[in-house]
Amino acid sequence: MFDAASSPGQNRRPLPPAQSPAGAVPGPRTPSSARKGPAKADRSGEQRDGRQRDAFFDNAKYLAIVLVAVGHSWEPLKSDSRVLQGVYDVVYTFHMPAFVLISGYFSRNFDLSPVRLKRLITGVAVPYVVFETAYSLFERYFNHNPGQDISLVYPFYLTWFLCALFVWRLTTPIWKLVRWPVPLALVVAMLATVASHIGDVLNMQRLLQFLPYFVLGVSLKPEHFRLVRRRSVRILSVPVFATALLVGWWAAPRMNAAWFYRRDSAPGLGAPWWTGPVMTLVMFGCAVLLTACFLSWVPGRNTWFTAIGSGTLYGYLLHGFLRKAGEYNGWFDHAWLHTPLGEIFVTVLAATVVTVLCTKPVQRVFRFAMEPKMEWAFRQDPVELARERQRRDHERAKVSL
């Protein structure tokens, strides 16, 4: 193994190829870029190591984060419009499940190897600590709420996703081991909805109720995504979404939208205990159906927003500060914003803002918090060090020739 550290020209055994950890979704890095010495992509999307990024997933991540930001911007406005409330309910039926499902798909190769654990810490755990602290301080000083403490066991606002992703990732080997992972995860989620004693620690209700979508993503294969991208599925998705919008309009005044947030148990929402498991199954079926329809319309080619799709975690975590600032300062109280034209304006503005927050300049500014290298915090892997030296020696040898 240490022969690789010798000077060029000596006989040496080639080191085994480096394994790249599964990328985070939403996340700033893809699986091929998660290892040390990441391959950067040029404007065409082709990476320097010769591999091509899949534009479909970058496009899907971008469109999903736009729906998340738009949905957040509708919250203060939806009570004045039954149409907006119906559309809001339809979007909330699938936008976070789609987000979590794609996260699971890119986590399917996760194991407890040092490289992947390091990526989990720097790409998920550290951003969680940073943004949990930042959001808590933002709430304390900008909303004049001195009672808001900084607590890493009680996720505040958007940080619940990072906390959940950290736990979900660690359990990935279990879901790859069991025979029926998705049904088992559904049982766990159903039991969570009847357990009113589950508190807010780690936002456990959300962690458990969204778990089936992550496990489904872990269980999916590339051919499943090719299946939903067929033209027949794209055509069928039109009447499906039309029906969903009609049902959403009908159900708007009749259904408690808190079911979509998955923050509470059925007793916590004032419903009989048995409605929790029933709603879990119904909403899982609806979410998977609408997610398939959504993915069927995601373009598979490179578009103007394809490159932005690699920075969705930036947009997800940063747009929350602007959304909270609007809430604290009464920006949504203007009467004009509660008109149809105002709602359209807010929708376009939210989509534009989250798009800007996903761009490369913003990523460069906040990379210290989102993608810290933290080499000082980890022991160096001798194999990785030897492989890096071998790569540099090889490059120097080519230059000398």
Image (cartoon, helix red, strand yellow):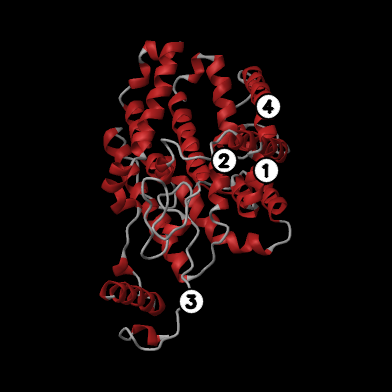
Is 155 situated left or right of 266 in this image? left
Q: Nearer the viewer, residue 240 or 126?
A: 240
- Three-letter code for the amino acid on which mark 2 is drawn: Ala
The reply to whether residue 200 is in sight is: yes
In percent of width and height, residue 279 lies at 69, 36
Determine contact: label 2, label 1, CB under 8 Å. Answer: no
Q: Looking at the image, which residue sits at the far front?
A: 401
Circle number at residue 240: 4
Q: Residues within 10 Å of mark 3 (few under 14, many from 20)?
A: few
Lower position in the chain sequence, tag 2 or tag 1: 2
In 3D space, how far apart are the residues under numbered discs 4 and 2 (Cα atoms)?
16 Å
Is residue 131 positioned above or below 294 on the image?
Answer: below
Is 216 situated left or right of 161 in this image? right
Q: Residue at x 32, y 30 (%)?
A: 325
- Three-letter code for the amino acid on which mark 1 is drawn: Leu
According to the picture, the residue beneath numbered tag 1 turns out to be 227
Is residue 87 positioned above or below 34 on the image?
Answer: above
Determine contact: label 4, label 1, CB under 8 Å. Answer: no
In percent of width and height, residue 35 lies at 42, 64
Mark 4, mark 3: which one is toward the viewer? 3
In 3D space, how far apart are the residues under numbered discs 4 and 1 (Cα atoms)?
17 Å
In 3D space, how far apart are the residues under numbered discs 1 and 3 (Cα atoms)?
34 Å
Secondary structure found at label 4: helix
Q: Residues within 10 Å of mark 4 (few under 14, many from 20)?
A: few
In percent of width and height, residue 22 lies at 50, 58
Q: Residue at x 37, y 31 (%)?
A: 323
Q: Nearer the viewer, residue 238 or 213?
A: 238
According to the picture, the residue beneath numbered tag 3 turns out to be 16
Secondary structure found at label 3: loop
Q: Nearer the viewer, residue 395 or 53?
A: 395
